[in-house]
Structures are given as C-alpha cells and as structure tokens.
C-alpha cells in the first residue's frame, strides 16, 4: 500500500518516478544512476529482528566529509539524487548536518532514511536550512506493540514525538516527510493498515506498507521461529535496483546492491577514487550483475541475491501514479490521494 496525502506530484522525487527511464523502461541503463545510495555510517543503536546488520563483520566507521564532497562533486549535474541510507542509522553520524549541506551545495536532491530516534530540533532546523528534500522514517509493524517486537531497543513514543516535531517545524511542507513500515503475516491480520495510514497522514505526506522479508537473516536462531510468518511473496522478479542505483559505503566502496551487509568482495565494483562513479555504473562488473539478476533471474548464483524476493509493490505503484498524473487517467483529490497493490 502506498498513500500520498496530496498526490504523487507533491513528491520531490516525482521527476524520477515519472521519467521515461524509470522501472520497466530502464534497459539499456541510463548513462548515470537515478540514485546514489550513500552510507554515512554503519553504526546503529537498534538490534532489529529483520536486519542483516546482525550478520555484518565490517568495522564501524563514518564517512569522511572530504570523501562525501568528492562524491557529490562527481554526481553534480548528472541528474542523480542522493539517499542517505546503508547499514547504519544516518543521523548517528556526528556531522550528518554537514553531509546534508554538502549534498545540497552541489544541487543534489537529497532523501534521508532514519529510524528517527536521534532527530533533534536543532538537527531538523539544519536540515530545513540546508534544503533537504525528504526525510523518511522507518517503522515496523502496524501498532506500537508490533513495532517494539521488531525494532529491539527502540522507543515508539520518542519516535512519534520526533515525527510530530519534524512536521511542526518544517516550512512550506518541506522537507517532504514519509513513513515506511513492513509487516509480518500475523501483524497484517491483527491490525488495520488503513488505520495505520490514517494515523500517520496527520503528520507526514506519504505512507507505505511493505512486506517483511526475513530470508536474509534466516540462519539466526532468534529469527527461525518466525520464518513461516513472514509475508514476503517468495517469487523471483527481475532486479530493478541494478538499473537504478549505485551503493557507496562509508569507506568509499562501490557495490551493486544495498542488501550486502558484509561488504563481500564479489559485490564490490571498486573503490571511489580509484574508479569514477560513471565508470562503475557502466563498467563490465555492473553489466554482468544486471545480466545475472536483472535479465536472467540468476539470483541463486549470487550470495546475497539468492535471499532476495519480491517484498514491495511501491516501485510499480510509483510508476502507476506518475503515469496517471501525466496522462490525466485518474482523479486526484485535494486532500488525499492513494493507490494500493498487493499490500
């Protein structure tokens, strides 16, 4: 389920979702990625049930400001947008506000993913001043109890307080605010997704509900009792991410995919500074991966991709919404616009 409060054109990234190269029109790939997924840090204050970070043996680190500046300089003018994401909580980076300022200085659209717990009024004001385009808050489940079960170590009341604070402090509805959650099968059965959506649309502009995938962490004893309860659709689909985004870790490693929490060498294209972003994107390694999982459905031959299944319809919904908005096929109300797929 994907719901907009004021329609898809209110989304600061609508220009990507409505572009001719988005999703099923992506092959051959564009000359530069749509997204640069940048990991400010792999440090996190939570121990979530579903998170592959539990398997990671990478040392904890933080992206250097000078490295970020070079990345943003290469991306500037290429039409790509930046997402602060990765295997940590971006807001834990001690200079996250400066990272945001540098991205915006290079005229890059910027989206920040966060669990929301470290957000402060001062930080939010810096994001507003810098011109951050979107802040997306990651939840889990549909109720406070489901959230607490999945996001071990978190604080639902604090998160809600911070989201309300962000909503009240922003100016002219910017940054755009969104909430993303995913659900296990029994969570979807015991709670109402419509109620969840209506609750959060009081404060944010977009709400998405996805399916929880536990297959990446299926080897963990704490996870095994819930494997039959995951709601992911266990079918293969052509990977879209290898046609849309490059992953850049805090140390400058460039990878095919953001699902590799271990930083495996076979998923690494190269290191920024030794290879340019454009060369990594259009190079032989990336093309081989596109062929393997983007065209040939060879997921089983890749250590991380073998655990990847279809757990979201939001990509298709973005495309559907954008096409409706472009063609006029569909009516959009003044207050709330929505569509939904399988979930």
Image (cartoon, rainbow, N blue to C red):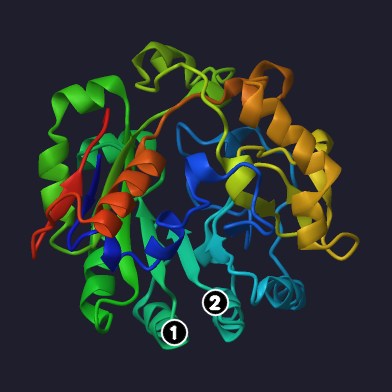
Image quadrant containing the N terminus: top left
Q: Is residue 255 above or below residue 66?
A: above
Sequence-earlier tag: 2 or 1: 2
Q: Is residue 54 above or below residue 253?
A: above
Report which residue position mark 1 lands on: 126
Q: Contact, CB < 8 Å: mark 2 with mark 1?
A: yes
Residue positioned most to the right: 274
Which residue lies at the image location 71% right of the left edge and 24% below the top edge?
A: 303
Left/right placement of residue 72 relative to residue 224 reads right
How far across and down, in percent of the image, does residue 320 sit? Answer: 31, 44
Which residue lies at the image location 63% right of the left edge and 31% below the top edge?
A: 294
Mark number displayed over residue 175:
none
Mark number displayed over residue 100:
2
Helix, strand or loop at label 1? It is helix
The residue mark sitting in front, 2 or 1, is 2
Left/right placement of residue 10 relative to residue 203 reads right
* Residue at mark 2 to residue at mark 1: CA–CA distance: 9 Å
How far across and down, in percent of the image, does residue 58 sit? Answer: 74, 44
């Amino acid at each position: 389920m994907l719901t907009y409060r004021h329609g898809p054109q209110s989304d600061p990234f609508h220009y990507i979702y409505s572009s001719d190269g988005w999703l099923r029109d992506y092959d051959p790939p564009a000359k530069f990625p749509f997204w640069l997924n940048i990991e400010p840090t792999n440090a996190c204050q939570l121990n979530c049930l579903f998170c592959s970070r539990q398997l990671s043996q990478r040392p904890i680190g933080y992206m250097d400001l000078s490295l970020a500046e070079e990345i943003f300089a290469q991306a500037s003018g290429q039409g790509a947008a930046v997402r602060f994401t990765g295997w940590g909580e971006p807001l834990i980076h001690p200079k996250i506000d400066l990272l945001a300022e540098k991205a915006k200085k290079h005229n890059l659209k910027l989206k920040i993913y966060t669990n929301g717990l470290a957000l402060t009024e001062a930080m939010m004001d810096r994001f507003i001043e810098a011109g951050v385009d979107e802040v997306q808050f990651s939840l889990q489940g549909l109720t406070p109890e489901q959230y607490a079960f999945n996001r071990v170590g978190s604080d639902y009341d604090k998160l809600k307080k911070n989201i309300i604070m962000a909503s009240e402090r922003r100016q002219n509805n910017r940054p755009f605010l969104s909430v993303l959650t995913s659900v296990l099968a029994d969570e979807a059965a015991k709670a109402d997704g419509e109620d969840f959506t209506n609750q959060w649309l009081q404060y944010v502009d977009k709400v998405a509900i996805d399916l929880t995938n536990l297959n990446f962490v299926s080897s963990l004893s704490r996870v095994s009792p819930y494997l039959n309860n995951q709601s992911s659709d266990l079918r293969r689909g052509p990977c879209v991410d290898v046609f849309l985004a490059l992953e850049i870790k805090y140390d400058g490693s460039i990878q095919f995919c953001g699902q590799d929490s271990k930083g495996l060498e076979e998923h690494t294209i190269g290191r920024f500074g030794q290879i340019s972003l454009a060369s990594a994107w259009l190079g032989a390694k990336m093309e081989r991966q596109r062929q393997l999982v983007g065209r040939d459905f060879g997921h089983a031959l890749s250590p991380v991709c073998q655990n990847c299944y279809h757990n979201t319809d939001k990509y298709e919904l973005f495309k559907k919404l954008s096409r409706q908005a472009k063609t006029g096929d569909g009516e959009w109300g003044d207050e709330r616009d929505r569509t939904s797929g399988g979930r």
